[in-house]
Amino acid sequence: MLCSTRQGNSSMGELSVIGFKPGSSPLHQLDPRTKQLLLMVLSVAILWGDVPFLVIISIVLLSLSHLAHLRIHRLFLEIRYFLFFLLFVFVVRAVSFNDQWLPVITVDGAQEAMTICWRLLLVVFMGVLLMSTTRTADIRAALIWGMKPLPFVNERITATMVGLVVRLLPLILFQASEIGDAMRARGIERRKNPFIRLTIFTITLFRGVFLRADALVDSMQARCYSEYRTLPELSFSWNDTIAAGVGMLVLLTAFIS
Amino acid sequence: MSIIQTSQLCHRFSDGTQSLSDVSLTFKEGEFTVIAGANGSGKTTLLRHFNGLLFPESGSVSVCGISVKKDPQAARRHVGMVFQDSDSQIIGDTVYDDVAFGPENLRLERSLIDQRVTQALSDVNLAGFEEKKPHNLSGGEKRRLGIAGVLSMAPRVLLMDEPFSNLDYPATCTVLSQVLKLHQAGHTIIITTHDLEKVIAHAQRLIVMEKGCVVQDGRPEELVADIEQYGIRPPCSVQLGKGIQAWVN
């Protein structure tokens, strides 16, 4: 499980495709509020949409990721643990038991399981696209803007929490791959019990992540961190209107199909 | 005029280890100080007290006459800290975001933040790097980015924890030149190191620490000959009998 191949990814710079990547693609140029709104609306539509809608949205997302120079094969490598989860979901949904308690897979069951996995994968894919084309500071600013009208919610603290998760996720993935390498270098593959391997890996990863988080907190405090800081200036443009229009057209296909 | 003052400063870690004992020091504005000591001598712990990242168990630390314990934010505004691990200091998604992080926390206007970022990046020769990913920079560039991130907050004192560790020769020379330029511009510089070779020629004051205590404090040329007893290697030029010699002109 921890032995999957990783191709030439050794520097922090190459740490993950999950995380902001500077660029000038159409998605980079959109206001983060537009992207967040489209993410929410399309995620709900995906969870209800049928196969033709999923095909359309897959084509749109693949085109956008190509324009944003997101490497799909690297992305699948990064989310390989999520793919294991999808495999688990597929098995649970597709396999049923007959009268003799023997496992059987029906075509209908497999189709339904495949559609569910496809939907979940598309939602995650949209999240990755948002993260890789939007600065963490912009995501935070957009969340503060969006949550401001909500009562009993401290929008700045909530947005900071989300921002830190977005910021730490690539670092955690990088740390995980470094620990995987270090364990392989010391012959972890000779330990055949996957639970022991997973335990060693998890404890080391958690310790590393906590230390990393500590260092990040120190660094933020040293530079006078405050929740009440100058926010990035956000502004809607014609591109956002066009994107919202295209998003709504895609959404309509969910109802038509 | 003194800018940082510690009085009988003591600090103990949560595991009971005494990390600082009775440290009383005064740093003058515009001074270039090197704090040297072997690993675990308390150098980094001392720096963290100046920036309000740690507070004394007993004794006191003040910056510009204000107690760090009472007002850590004021200390952090006046005293900028460049960490030993450049990667852990990177906060922003781009070079611009990272350098702007400090001024944004100070709630400056966006136009002023842009000015400060431009100036800080220019000061460390990173102009034009604004849209690059910080993690893609080289070791020396990351170190200079760390300095720019602090400079953009316009501090009066710059603390640098082992600023030359893990840098190759050209990168060390570049960072050292930037540090000297900042000192000439009037910044108070405090550098910790266990390797005096690169920086000692430019320092006006050398403080030697051992087991959490200050064991020597004076002019580098007076102290450097006998420094080996504290687990610090004297510069090659001193060992060859040529006195202290500079790495960069």
Image (cartoon, helix red, strand yellow):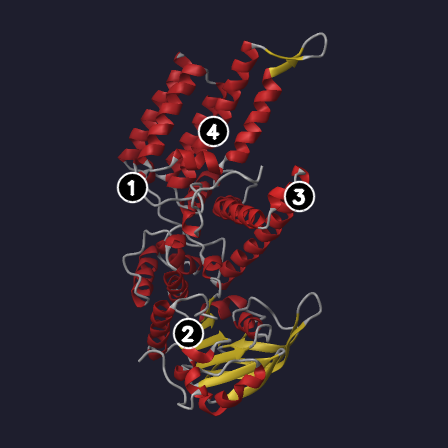
Q: Earlier in the sequence, mark 3 or mark 4?
A: 4
Marks 2 and 4: which is nearer the front? 4
Specify the subunit that label 3 lies on.
A
Question: Badge 2, how many Cα within 10 Å: few under 14, some, many 20+?
Answer: some
Q: Which residue is mark 4?
A: A123
Kindly report the distance in space between the C-alpha atoms of the residues bearing marks 1 and 4.
23 Å
Q: Is residue B109 left or right of residue A163?
A: left
User: Are circles 3 and 4 on residues that touch, CB within 8 Å?
Assistant: no
Quadrant housing residue B91: bottom left
Q: Are discs 3 and 4 both within one chain?
A: yes
Kindly report the distance in space between the C-alpha atoms of the residues bearing marks 3 and 4.
30 Å
Query: In this orientation, which residue lies closer to the viewer: A202 or A191?
Result: A191
Compared with B148, A146 (above or below) is above
Marks 3 and 1: which is nearer the front? 3
Q: Are discs 1 and 4 both within one chain?
A: yes
Q: Which residue is mark 1?
A: A24
Query: Which amino acid, by three-letter code, is at mark 1?
Result: Ser
Question: Badge 1, how many Cα within 10 Å: few under 14, some, many 20+?
Answer: few
Question: Badge 3, how many Cα within 10 Å: few under 14, some, many 20+?
Answer: few
Assign a secondary structure to mark 1.
loop
Q: Which residue is mark 3?
A: A199
Compared with A207, A75 (above or below) is above
Q: Which residue is mark 2?
A: B156
Q: Is residue A47 left or right of residue B147?
A: right
Kindly report the distance in space between the C-alpha atoms of the residues bearing marks 2 and 3.
48 Å
User: Are circles 2 and 4 on residues that touch, CB within 8 Å?
Assistant: no
